[in-house]
Amino acid sequence: MLRPLWLLALPALIGLGWWLHRRAGGLGDWQRATDPALLRAMAALGRVDSSASRVPLMAMLATVGLTVLSLTGPAIERRDTLSFRNLDGVLYIVDASASVTEDARWPQMLTMGRFGLAALGTRPGGLIVFAGDAYVATDMTLDHLQLGQTLSLIDADTVPDDGSRPERALALAVELLDNAEVISGDVILLGDGAGLGPASLQAASAIAARGARLSLVSLDPPGPVFDTHAAAGAGRVFTLNQTDALAEWLAEDARMRLMAQDYPLLFWQDMGRYLLLLALLPLLLLFRRQAT
C-alpha cells in the first residue's frame, strides 16, 4: 500500500457503523421517549412497524469503506517498465581563478550560466571548475536545480591551485563525457581566455571529434583565440550580453538521443482508482425506489 496511514480511518468507520446500526434498530429514540407499556399495547394493536430496512446504512458504510481502501493506494509491482535516458548532455567548465571570480562582471556570468541551465530540458548537465588544476564539481545529473546552486557557490576559494589551466579542464571534460556514455552534447567554457593556447586547442578538437561541441562565454570582449577554439570545437562564442542567445543555442539545437536503460525499474501501479469504481455499486442502492 502506497498510503497505509489511511487504514487508521477504518476502526473509526467500524465504530460509527456499529453506533448507527444500534440507533437504526427497532424504533430508535422512540423506545427511550415512550412508555414501554404503551409501546407494547400499540404493537399488539398493529400500530408499530419495526421492520425498517438497513440496506441504505450498509450501502453507505460499504461505499465509505471502499473509498478509504482506495485512498490507501493498493499497488502491484511491475518490473517490465522500460526506462530511457538522454544521451545528449551539457557540461559547464568554469574558470574559478581570481581574475574571473573577483571581476565586477562575475555575477553577470553566473546569471548567464543559470539561464543556460534552464534550457537543458531532459539533457543531463555537469560542472567542472578549474584554475591551476581542474576538478569535477558535479557529475552528469538531471538535477538542474542542484547544479545551478553549485554554480552559484563558485568563488575565488573554490579551487586552491593558482593559475589558469583550461586544457586540463577540457581534457577532464572528454573523460567525463566518456564515463557518462554521452555520445553528443555541448561543452560550455566560461572564462576570460587566460591559459588558452595550443594544448587547449588540441583538447577542443578532441571534444569535437567525439561528437560534442565546444562553445565559449567570454568575460571580456572576445579575441581571436576564442574564435579559434570555437571553430576547432564546432561551437560558437558568446559575450555576456548574449544570455538569450546561449539559452536558444542549448534549447533549439538539443539532440534528443534516447537509449533504454540496461537495468529494470521498480514500478508500482496504483490500483486505488479501480476500487473507487467498485464503491459505486453499493452507492447505487441508496438511489433505489422504495416499494409502495
Image (cartoon, rainbow, N blue to C red):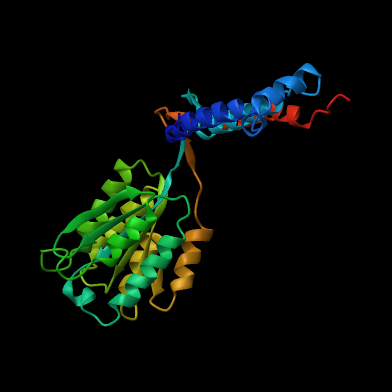
Residue 271 place in picture, x, y as percent? 56, 28
Q: Say which quarter of the image contains residue 170.
A: bottom left
180 to 191, vertically: above or below: above
Give me the residue at 34% from left, 77% from top.
108
**Residue that sits furthest to the top in the current view:** 44
Residue 131 place in picture, x, y as percent? 17, 65
Left or right of residue 262, residue 154 in this image: left
**Rendered-image quadrant of the C terminus:** top right
Q: Nearer the viewer, residue 267 or 274?
A: 274
Inspect this view and state whether residue 149 appears. yes
**Rendered-image quadrant of the N terminus:** top left
Left or right of residue 204, residue 160 in this image: left
Left or right of residue 278, residue 47 in this image: right
**Residue that sits furthest to the left in the current view:** 161
Give me the residue at 15% from left, 63% from top.
159
Give me the residue at 33% from left, 71% from top.
110
Q: Say which quarter of the image contains residue 187.
A: bottom left
Total marks drawn? 0
243 to 79, vertically: above or below: below
Residue 22 place in picture, x, y as percent? 59, 26
Inspect this view and state whether residue 223 appears. no
Q: Nearer the viewer, residue 156 or 78?
A: 78
Q: Nearer the viewer, residue 232 or 177?
A: 177
173 to 292, vertically: above or below: below
Give me the residue at 71% from left, 24% from top.
39
Left or right of residue 134, residue 162 in this image: left
Residue 162 place in picture, x, y as percent? 10, 68
